[in-house]
């Protein structure tokens, strides 16, 4: 058994300012990597720059990471980071800027390498990374994974290197102003991480302990994402923090086990149809779980508060409906059947018939 979690994680109200000294301790010039504007609107960017300003750390902001960040964007930010001699990288935003920040930190620290290095199986160090998430789903702040869009291959593929943030600062307030659909979509991604980590050949007592705790926490948040829940309630700062913490716990879980078939099946749908990441994974989850071992299935359903996989499927479909035609589902199923890395994370045997079933073909 192995448990590896090198990221120092803090969560709580005003987390960035509460841990100002640590945030400002990574170097002299930060490259801040962020999305297309939401980090300004939810004040996460200002919280960070206020701390850096007050501690005399200079910075350059790379703003403009797109959803499902591309290798091209990573290389653009890398060039800027090298130009300004950044000695650490701060990612702020959803999973896209956080993933991009990891890849950028790796490339800046290996300045003689071209983008192909992202996909080389070699050992390499990255610059120190601080991650401040503003969505409640990817857990990227505590994983070593960076999922990047490969336009040359027309899909998304994780870089080969595992690059964990050194520090993660989690504060629920950043999702309070987010559109409801973003909170729901990313909460479904977090749930997918928990389920895929549990139904996984790499699962062990350590990872499962984490998963069951994460699912219980996630369940306590259901009234805040489902307006048909009998206890339905408006998201407030405390529940927002709980959602972010469930997402971080889910991230810690997949950092141990990796994801499995629902994630693998999702990538083509996101690339070709633009379906957001959470719903694209969520649509396969109930059927993936249904085919798993009864014991783990029952534990997950009980912890999450569902009577059956069917009820789980209806819940996800109601909260984050996805429409994808059979042709692309079939193509995605076929390509995942030859993806040995993802297949080996699935604890049961999957032939073409089972894969089609999970894909909903
Ligand atoms: P995202 O792609 O980072 O962002 C989606 C949208 O939400 C963007 O338009 C962004 O706007 C906006 N946004 C972000 N935070 C907001 C806030 N607080 N309020 C309002 N709008 C906000 O979304 P995500 O679902 O968090 O990340 C998905 C990516 O993460 C995918 O590429 C997926 O493959 C990857 N992922 C990585 C891991 C991992 O372990 N590393 C795990 C799962 C998924 P701006 O552009 O303006 O910021
Ligand atoms: Zn995910």
Image (cartoon, grey):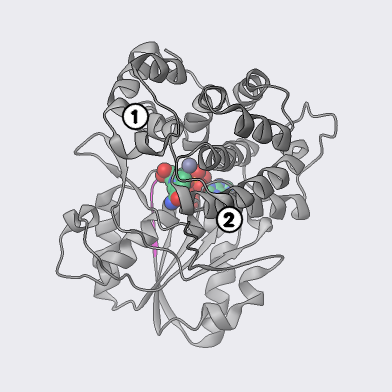
Q: Residues within 10 Å of mark 2 (few under 14, many from 20)?
A: few
> What mark, if any, has residue 41 been given in the picture?
2
Q: Is mark 2 within 8 Å of ligand 1?
A: yes
Q: Indicate the quadrant where residue 357 lies.
A: top left
For the record, the magenta segment spans: 62-67
In the image, taking residue 307 as reference, residue 168 lies left or right, namely: left
Residue 185, image x and y in percent?
57, 36
Residue 74, image x and y in percent?
29, 56
Assess whether mark 1 and mark 2 are in contact (beta carbons under 8 angstroms): no
Indicate whether residue 201 is drawn in magenta.
no
In the image, taking residue 264 as reference, residue 203 lies left or right, namely: right
Q: Main secondary structure of the magenta part?
A: loop
Q: Residue at x 64, y 19 (%)?
A: 314
In the image, taking residue 290 as reference, residue 201 lies left or right, namely: left
Give the vertical position of 202 relative to 83 (above or below): above
Q: Residue at x 19, y 58 (%)?
A: 117
- Choose the circle earlier in sequence order: 2 or 1: 2
Secondary structure found at label 2: helix
Q: Real-space Cα distance between discs 2 and 1?
A: 31 Å
Give the vertical position of 339 relative to 74 (above or below): above
- Residue at far right of view: 231
**Residue 329 shows up from this direction:** yes
> According to the image, label 1 marks what residue?
268
Pick the residue in front: 343 or 181: 343
- Residue at far bottom of view: 56
Q: Residues within 10 Å of mark 1 (few under 14, many from 20)?
A: many
């Amino acid at each position: 058994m192995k448990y590896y979690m090198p990221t120092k994680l803090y969560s709580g109200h005003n987390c960035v300012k509460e841990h100002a000294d640590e945030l400002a301790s990574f170097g002299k010039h930060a490259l801040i990597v962020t999305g297309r504007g939401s980090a300004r609107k939810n004040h996460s960017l200002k919280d960070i720059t206020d701390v850096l300003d007050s501690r005399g750390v200079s910075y350059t902001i790379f703003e403009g990471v797109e959803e499902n960040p591309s290798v091209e964007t990573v290389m653009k930010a890398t060039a800027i980071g090298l130009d300004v001699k950044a000695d650490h990288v701060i990612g702020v935003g959803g999973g896209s800027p956080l993933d991009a920040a990891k890849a950028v930190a790796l490339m800046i620290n290996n300045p003689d390498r071209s983008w192909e290095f992202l996909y080389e199986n070699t050992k390499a160090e990255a610059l120190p990374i601080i991650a401040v998430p503003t969505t409640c789903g990817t857990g990227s702040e505590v994983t070593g994974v960076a999922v990047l869009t490969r336009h040359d291959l027309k899909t998304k593929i994780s870089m080969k290197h595992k690059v964990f943030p050194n520090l993660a600062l989690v504060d629920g307030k950043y999702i309070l102003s987010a559109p409801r659909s973003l909170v729901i979509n990313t909460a479904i991604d977090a749930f997918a991480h928990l389920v895929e980590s549990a139904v996984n050949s790499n699962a062990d007592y350590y990872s499962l302990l984490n998963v069951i705790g994460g699912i219980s926490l996630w369940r306590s948040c259901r009234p805040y994402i489902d307006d048909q829940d009998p206890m339905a309630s408006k998201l407030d700062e405390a529940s927002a923090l709980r959602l972010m913490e469930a997402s971080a716990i889910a991230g810690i879980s997949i950092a141990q086990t990796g994801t499995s078939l629902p994630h693998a099946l999702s990538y083509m749908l996101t690339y070709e149809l633009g379906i957001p990441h959470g719903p694209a994974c969520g649509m396969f989850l109930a059927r993936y779980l249904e085919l798993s071992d009864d014991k783990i299935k029952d534990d997950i359903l009980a912890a999450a508060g569902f009577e059956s996989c069917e009820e789980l499927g209806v819940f996800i479909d109601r909260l984050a409906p996805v429409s994808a035609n059979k042709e692309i589902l079939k193509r995605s199923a076929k390509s995942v059947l030859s993806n040995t890395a993802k297949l080996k994370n699935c604890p049961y045997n999957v032939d073409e018939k089972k894969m089609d079933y999970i894909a909903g073909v």
